[in-house]
Image (cartoon, grey):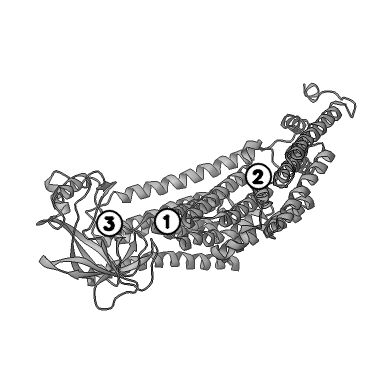
Amino acid sequence: MTIPPTKHLVSFGFLATALLQLAILASCLFLWETTLHHGQVLKLRCAPVDPYDAFRGRYVSLRLEGQEATYEGRNTRKRGSTVFATLQEGEEGFAHFAALTARAPKEVPYVRVQLLRDASPQQKVAFRVPFDRYFLNEKLAPEAEIAYREANRREPGQGRAWVELRVRHGIGIIESVQLENESLEEAARRRGGT
Amino acid sequence: MSKSHHRWLAKELAAWEEESLITEEVSRLLQHRYGITSRSAEENASRTSVILSLFGGLLIGAGIITLFAFNWEQLDRGERGIIAFLPLLAAQALTLFVLRTGRKDSTAWREGSAAFFFMALAGSMGILFQTYQIGGTLRDFLLMWSLLSLPIVYWLRSLFGTFLYTITITAWCLLTTMVSTTLAYLLLQGLLLPLMLGFAFRKTPLPRIIKHLFGILHGLSLLLFLGKLLTLQDAGEGEWTLAISLLSLSYLLLAQWVGPTAIPSYFRPFRRIGLAFLMGMAFFLTYQNSPAIDSLSELSSPLVLGTLALTGLLLSALLARQKRWLPLLGWTVPLLLFAGHPILANLAIALIGTALIMKGSALGNSLAVNVGVFLLAVLAILRFFDADLPLLIKAAGFIGVGVAFLTFNGIRARRKAKPTFPPTSSPAKELS
């Protein structure tokens, strides 16, 4: 029995579409996996949190310290634009956001961030980082949220929680969230999460 | 009576009802007399099957999402990464199965598969994002989700897929924070256009209820987009003029596509909303040069202008196809308005008012006549206010228009009361 040519066409066309869909998702996976393998490790302190805004669903909402920096681009950028935040390692091995640039810097680690308001040159402006959630098992999450909140109830700069971030080509992926000497998961389990 | 006659009569009855020539009750009685049923048992069964397939696809997909959202921490990152692709692969396999077998002609299979695909893709993306701790924004997620799903909507020619796609891009549009990004909504909506045109001009028309849902969804989507755009733009009157015209044309286009219907009027808002917007605009433009002209450079978006032109052309094509020459002439009013001079706007309203009175009188459609008279009266009153005339003359003018209005209605009411043809036996009596 011969298969009509239109059927072949449908199959090939559809397979091309399906492969494209898979390739797009696979390229995301590849990008994130290579960042985790080859990215530079940086530690960023977490900021104190509002206890009522910290937890949404099955992830812990993270807020990092110093999520504002001076915009060093030449032209004004609108709220919502993507810019590049450079990272600089400082005291005790913790990194902080040093500046915002319109173009990707070559020498220093950086991540893509989104402006929270319009930015003029040399103006300090707040931004949003793409790594603001830490997903957890639903049974661990409630305890993890309490542990994270308690660890962060201190003055800015004194917080005991930090994220370990892998950074590569502007992509930042959280490797772990640490509370003093243990990971967030370990702290949650110690508190009774299963 | 043959099936084709049945179809012809059903169509005509719907049109007569639409034009208020007969009431809904009379239409129902005539349908009963000639054995016209609005839906056969077979159609009903098929509709149920489609609905069940849709829910099935959605529920299975939602189940998969929930299953994986559990965050199986006992699996390592690599394993979870691979598992993430399973829902997508399953949905792709199902789609291929539907396309390769005769099931592509079954609405239930097509729509059910599309629903499953949407959910499965969201599941795959969700697991990947969760595994790699990608917070990101809901906006980014929605954009990626809609764009990756679109090819499947085309492959399956799924109407429900277009619904989901429209909902997704509308939600994405509402979450945008920049004008330039918001305008990309038109581009995203445009990606659906070839498929929508296919639906509009296909040989077997879509069921009316589906057309209505389709229209309501797209109308709302467009409305939300415009609201978002204008809010971000701190819109002036020029932008509003342009936006409302665009909206009006779109509503009229949808109304024209939906066509005469037996569904109660509260379920078919497009024509009236579109016309109300257009008339409001027309009166606004009788006061000044069209601010739309000045604001074109501000909006400076070929997308907006392109959509405006395209919507107008589509509307013309639909009207010409239906050989509805008077409405075809009528919709060109926005062009007159855009020409920019108040005299043209005045002229346009006067023409519409007169045409409505004439056509309404010829068909005995009182609503059309009253709307026509109302338009002319409002126009006259507005011009009286503008004119540099003594108050007494203005007062006399107002009274004159009012009296003319009442007299006209009185004459019509008397004519209507006179029987123009001998009474026949009651349809209800005949049925019994």
State how far apart marks 1 and 3 are (Cα). Answer: 18 Å
State how far apart marks 2 and 1 are (Cα). Answer: 34 Å
The dot on residue B142 is 1
Foreground residue, B140 or B164?
B140
Contact flag, marks 1 and 3 (Cβ < 8 Å): no
Asked if both marks, 2 and 3, belong to the same chain, the answer given is no
Q: For residue A111, which quarter of the picture?
A: bottom left
Graded by Cα atoms within 10 Å as few (under 14), some (14 to 19) or many (20 or more), the crowding at tag 3 reads some
Q: As shown in the figure, which amino acid type bears the numbered disc 1? A: Leu
Graded by Cα atoms within 10 Å as few (under 14), some (14 to 19) or many (20 or more), the crowding at tag 2 reads few
State how far apart marks 2 and 3 are (Cα). Answer: 47 Å
Report in which chain the residue with disc 3 lies. A
Lower position in the chain sequence, tag 2 or tag 1: 1
Query: Nearer the observer, disc 2 or disc 3?
Result: 2
Which secondary structure lies at badge 1? helix
Q: As shown in the figure, which amino acid type bears the numbered disc 2? A: Ala
Report in which chain the residue with disc 1 lies. B
**Can you identify the residue that label 3 sits on?**
A132
The dot on residue A192 is none
Query: Nearer the observer, disc 1 or disc 3?
Result: 3
| In the image: residue A134, left or right of residue B91 | left
Residue B118 horizontal/vertical position (percent) = 45, 53
The quarter of the picture where the C terminus of chain B appears is top right
Contact flag, marks 2 and 1 (Cβ < 8 Å): no
Residue A164 horizontal/vertical position (percent) = 19, 62
Residue B13 shows in this picture: no
**Can you identify the residue that label 2 sits on?**
B276
Q: As shown in the figure, which amino acid type bears the numbered disc 3? A: Asp
Is B230 drawn above or below residue B266 in the view shown?
Answer: below
Residue A78 shows in this picture: yes
Count the marks.
3
Foreground residue, B253 or B299?
B299
